[in-house]
Amino acid sequence: MRKALARPLCGTREMRMRSCELRLHLMNLNKTPEQSFSGTIRKIKLLKTVKPQEEWVALFRANLAMRIKIEQKRELLAGDTAVFRNLSLFWKAFWRPKHYLRVVYAASLTVALFLLGGGVTVWAAMKSLPGSAFYPLKIVLENMRLYATSGESRYTLQSEMTSRRLEELKTVVNSGDSLESKAEKLETVVQHIQQQLIADKKQLPVIGVGETENSIKTIKEVSQRAEQVKKTINEVKESLAVSETGNNLNLNEKLAEVSATAEKTSFQALETLIAKTEKTDVERQDILAKFGNLIQEKEKSIIVIDKITDGKISAINQATTTVYKLPINAVLVNQADEARLLLERIENDLKEEDFVSALQTLRALNEIVKGAEAIVQNSGNKEALIIDQAAVNLAATTSAETLIEK
Amino acid sequence: MNLIKNEKDFLQLYDEYVEKIYRYIFFRVGSEELARDLASEVFLRSWQYINQTRSSKLGIFNSKNQKIENPRAFLYQVARNLIVDNYRQKEILPISLEEIADTQIADKIADKKNDPRELADKSLEIEIVKNALTKLNEDYQEIIIWRYLDDLEIKEIAEILGKTENAVRVLLFRALADLKAVLKKL
């Protein structure tokens, strides 16, 4: 059989060569492309790192959501058709505006929105809450206003926008809506908070590029907003932990994502502040205060882990005295010990004002604490996370204050 | 894949595919700005089309009363058509590497915190692969982007191109062989 295959049917050299190529081709066809071209495919997959700007993705999403809602409410918005024609003209010019026209575009559109019968619509939009048909319009209007603002006013506006989102988050959590509706609205707000955090992170000055008074102010503003977001998200998580809405996996993932982004932003802001070559006493105090806040959070988490490994968790509802016990997890005990060692190291670094080393150690501590929290989360016992929060806060505050004072 | 039943589903589709659609368009047209414009247009037009067919209260049907069973493939078809329309309007050929600044790829690499040397090496390798990709014909470029960057199945690619699955496999094989040959020369 082999001899028969080896001998071509025709005698010429060209025909023999074509026959060999055909056999080779047929052999390759028995292999998948992944087998035949693994090296080439690996190189192609490098191109997966090409991505669009996150800001554009977020802004266009808001625009798309708004357009979808508007089409649904077309009858209500019939008087604003001229306004939305201007919006599309504005949108087409958005990526190529001349600098001096930016404010003109934004201002004229805002005026047009009010004067062309959209006054009620815009008012309704600005008062709207997540879940309302006008909410996407509210977001777009805020972003447009931000786009046209610069300098000090921009910082103020950004802080206002963050505060507004966090207020909306609390309003939804405390509302009497159905669980499904609440979860959906929370997801919407959390997504917008995430987008704001990403935009904030991008504003942080690049280390070593050149420090100005403005860049220091930006760092502090961004850091403050990130802290505000973390605090509110933690409060929301605690509120939701006792309710059925807290079982919504998608919502929990989004809350975790926002928390993680806020934390990264805090760390990045601190890193940028530390990188400033000359520090005044006030700036050193600022850095120590920021370390204090971050350390306090980690302290709380370590206390929770300690309580869990001790097997002593009491229900937050004082009406019951159910005690929840988890089997002692050797890994958790080890991680808690490791975390305490790192806290000591941070304390020493801060005493010597070695902020860079302290930050590196704090990042390592953060990873250990996150790992431990993930183990507890995955244990499936949600009730184990409901603890005597007041006691934890007091213990953490006392400990962190002692650390900084030393 | 679930049908698009409502606006929430469509926005989820957006979240899932905006990066892929943008990337596909970017590699075809070579301009970040144009890729954003066309990607935006893809989703706007897709929504308008779906919304019009929904209002007929027959579900998600196209003008031939056929269900859009694969919204992902539909998005790519819309993107493809827009790219072709764009070329016709502007009489622009697929952009060559010389027209693309070196910084474009480096800027778009998501993680800028890499070691600068690693980043430079990565950028160079990416640039080489992109250069090679642009030297292929359009059909080969598309099939490589869809299969290995956007992780489309052979069946989905066949649906977009209107070919059989076997024809797509052969096309893919030839595209990879071509790309390998071009990479060897570079």
Image (cartoon, coloured by chain):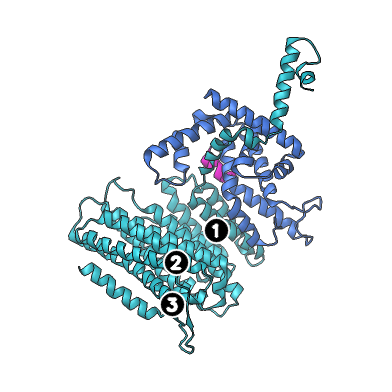
- Mark 2 vs mark 1: give the one in front: 2
Question: Residue B116 at x, y = what percent?
Answer: 37, 40
Q: Which mark is residue A62?
A: 1
Quote the CA–CA distance across marks 3 and 1: 46 Å
Q: Main secondary structure of the magenta part?
A: helix
Outermost residue on the top side: it is: A12
Labels 2, 1: one chain: yes
Magenta region: which residues? B31-38
A139 horizontally vs B140: left or right: left
Q: Is residue A22 above or below residue A240?
A: above
Between B153 and A345, the one nearer to me in the picture: A345
Please identify the quarter of the rendering in which residue A6 is found.
top right
Residue at 38% x, 61% y: name it: A366
Q: Amino acid at mark 2?
A: Glu
| Mark earlier in primary sequence (2, 3) | 3
User: Is B134 colored magenta in this rendering?
Assistant: no
| Mark earlier in primary sequence (3, 1) | 1
Q: Is residue A92 above or below residue A300?
A: above
Q: Which residue is mark 3?
A: A311
Q: Which chain is rendered cyan in the image?
A: A
Q: Secondary structure at mark 3?
A: loop
- Mark 2 vs mark 3: give the one in front: 3
Quote the CA–CA distance across marks 2 and 1: 33 Å
Q: Secondary structure at mark 2?
A: helix
Residue at 40% x, 73% y: name it: A304
Q: Amino acid at mark 3?
A: Gly
| Mark earlier in primary sequence (2, 1) | 1
Question: Residue B101 at x, y = what percent?
Answer: 46, 33
- Which color is chain B depicted in? blue
Q: Amino acid at mark 1?
A: Ala
Q: Answer whether labels 3 and 1 touch (C-beta < 8 Å).
A: no
Q: Which residue is mark 2?
A: A373
